[in-house]
Amino acid sequence: MIAHGRYSGLGFPANWIITDIVRMEDGVFVEHWDVIQDEATKEQSRSGHPMFGDTFPK
């Protein structure tokens, strides 16, 4: 299972983009990984696309 989201309004200089990856066996969590990184601005984006959603945050 993978969950992906943008966390904003936490008082940090940049929004966070967070991905949680969970592996389950027989309905039980057996492993968990996560990735947390600052959201790239439009100027920082090499592809010109936002990390999350269709638009860059204001």
Image (cartoon, helix red, strand yellow):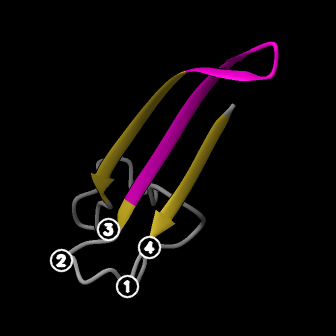
Q: Nearer the viewer, mark 2 or mark 3?
A: 2
Instruction: Based on the picture, tell me whether residue 12 belongs to the magenta stretch.
Output: no
**Label 1 – label 4 distance at C-alpha:** 15 Å
Q: In this figure, which residue is indicated by the disc labeled 3?
A: 42
Q: Earlier in the sequence, mark 4 or mark 3?
A: 3
Q: Which residues are magenta?
A: 17-30
Element at label 2: loop
Q: Nearer the viewer, mark 4 or mark 2?
A: 2
Q: In this figure, which residue is indicated by the disc labeled 1?
A: 9
**Marks 1 and 4 close (CB-CB < 8 Å):** no
Instruction: Based on the picture, tell me whether residue 18 belongs to the magenta stretch.
Output: yes
Q: How far across and how far down the image is residue 2, in percent?
A: 63, 36
**Marks 4 and 3 close (CB-CB < 8 Å):** yes
**Label 4 – label 3 distance at C-alpha:** 6 Å
Q: Which mark is residue 56?
A: 4
Q: Main secondary structure of the magenta part?
A: strand
Q: In this figure, which residue is indicated by the disc labeled 2?
A: 13
Q: Earlier in the sequence, mark 1 or mark 4?
A: 1
